[in-house]
Image (cartoon, rainbow, N blue to C red):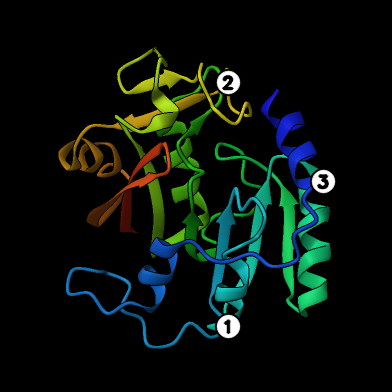
Amino acid sequence: MITKEYAKRYAEDKTSAVYPVEFVVRAFLGNYPATCINDDNFEGKKILDIGYGDGRNMPLLNNIGMEIHGIEIADEINQHVRDRLDALGINATLKKGANANIPYEDGFFNYVLACHACYYVEQGDTFDTNLDEISRVLEPGGKFIASLAMTGSYILKDAKQLDPGHYEITNDPYGLRNGTIFRAFDSEIEIKEALSPFFNDIVVGYCDDLFWGLHQKVWTVICKKK
């Protein structure tokens, strides 16, 4: 269901200009004492943008010199964003894939970015399935930059609780994600417990925004593959 709805949404999206997400800008360009990125040179480093949507973060990644790869759940989304990037003169390798099925070899990437994406869980899987796959495609010491769903966010209103921390979405105001499963977190401690089998140097932040009736609350995370 979600594949069909998202493919339709992006196929109908004729917007030529898109803008990067603030936490992504801050992660790569900010100068914060706790951030474990702090890399002086991104030139030529390979990054995977998981569930990149309209490709809004890719111009930023291109500007800092990264070799861009992305996966999305539908070929139609890949084609739509490929056309947009071609018009901007940006090279990127875009493939069909999912959180638990990344079509790349072990240790291929220096960085993995998951902006509002990695907490989608397929039926029969858990969030650990996603983390194991993300860790697999990162090199040792490679960095994972992500946002995670926070309990109390608008998307979890009236959600059906499944396994601990997993929720089935039932009341998406955009009508796109009903029936999908999210992994959401109550606390920084819970996040570190979930990530620590795969990653270390885990740094957690959060965003808490009220956008004219939609209360969006997300955790932000930067960590390194063990």
Question: On the image, numbered disc 1 is attached to which residue?
Answer: 63
Check disc 2 and report its element: helix, strand or loop. Answer: loop
Point 45% across, 36% down: residue: 119
Measuring from the top left, give residue 29's x and y in whole percent: 39, 78
Q: Nearer the viewer, residue 95 or 154?
A: 154
Numbered circle sitting on residue 11: 3
Front-most of residues 171 and 38: 171
Of labels 2 and 1, the one closer to you: 2
Image coords of residue 224 (percent x, y): 32, 60
Measure the C-alpha gap from mark 2 to mark 1: 35 Å
Q: In this picture, is 203 found above or below 72?
A: below
Dot 3 falls on a residue whose secondary structure is: helix
Label 1 neighbour load within 10 Å: few <14, some 14-19, many 20+ = few
Examine the rendered structure and indicate whether residue 129 appears above or below residue 139. above
Q: CA distance from mark 3 to mark 2?
A: 20 Å
Element on which disc 1 rests? helix
